[in-house]
Amino acid sequence: MYLERALNECNESVNALEGKGASPDLIEAYVNRGCVLYMMGYYTSAMEDLTSASVMMDRLESEGIGTDAGTYVKAHATMGAILFEQNSYASEEYADALSRLNELNDGSKHFDRAGIIRMCVESAENLLDCECPEDAERFVEKGLSIVGQSQDRWSRNRVMGLNTLLGECLLAEGDLRGAMDRYSTAIEVGTLLVDDNMIEDMEDLVVPIISRSQCESDLGLDQMYISDLELAIGLLEEMAKINKLEDTDVLVHMHQDAASALMSMGKVQEAEKHLLRAVSMGVHGAKDYMDSQNPGQM
């Protein structure tokens, strides 16, 4: 009902302004309606409004009439999100949003502080899926600059998530050491959140630990790799005990990975503990994996 009422109000605004020609007010009306249509799932109509706003902004800009950075970024980031949802080429719209991202602040139209951070996270995630990690990195850096040094629960959890996301950007760019550093920052922040009983979701801490372990494996840092695997396993098993782990398959696979690494280091007894734990969880295929990894012992 709320979105329907909002759409009716937007329609009234657009209808009242369209006959007066291009103006900042009409641009705002198009962007507002386009965003409502997007939230309602009317992607084609949303793109029409947002494209009209974009063309109008370019026209006014050429005439020396500037537009608010928030309006510009909102239009292009939303178009990027729509194209991403439609499996279309979204990076050009995100590139347009990036062209004015540095101007964006919590006084810009269409955004408050939290809204900027959420937009940066969504845009970065979509760009990573589009294999554009450099552009994704710029959105993450903007998010981190906005969250700053705030110590409230929401902000601290966002710092952890943004650093994990930045690690993914650097990993996609082939910078394993840089990715490890960012994952380490995320883990440090997340560990403090756990100590302060302020973490929103324990999986948000597990993710950078697992990601860092993969970097360590690729770099041949075997002991560090095993240590991180066992750290993540411990956290996931604690989650499983209190029914907070929806998919136990990931835990079984991690036990198997730890066992394989330990076997390669000649630590058979430690490897068997992980294999037995995988079997005890009763997941299909774990017993076969155990037999194939240690046929002489099983």
Image (tube, helix red, strand yellow):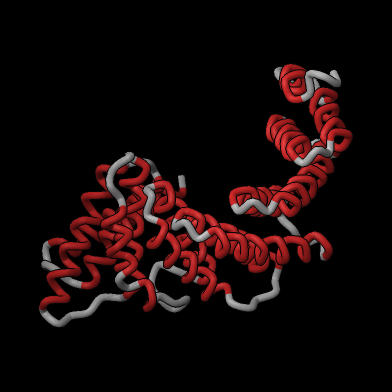
Above or below, 228 relative to 243: below
Which picture quadrant has residue 262?
top right
Is 68 situated left or right of 48 in this image?
A: right
- Residue 47 drawn at (x, y percent): 25, 49
Which picture quadrant has residue 243?
top right
Which residue is at the front of the view, 274 or 13?
A: 274
Would residue 247 be visible to someone looking at this image?
no
Would residue 151 be visible to someone looking at this image?
yes
Is 293 situated left or right of 117 in this image?
A: right
Which residue is at the front of the view, 188 or 214?
A: 214
Seen as rendered, the residue at the extreme bottom is: 64
How many numbered discs, if any?
A: 0
- Residue 6 drawn at (x, y percent): 39, 53
Above or below, 10 relative to 37: below
Q: Which residue is drawn at the image coordinates 30% and 68% (left, top)?
A: 72
Which residue is at the front of the view, 138 or 268?
A: 268
| Quadrant that contains the C terminus | top right
- Residue 246 drawn at (x, y percent): 71, 34
Q: Which residue is drawn at the image coordinates 48% and 70% (left, top)?
A: 141
Is 279 situated left or right of 49 in this image?
A: right
Above or below, 174 relative to 287: below
Is 272 situated left or right of 131 in this image?
A: right
- Residue 104 drawn at (x, y percent): 40, 75
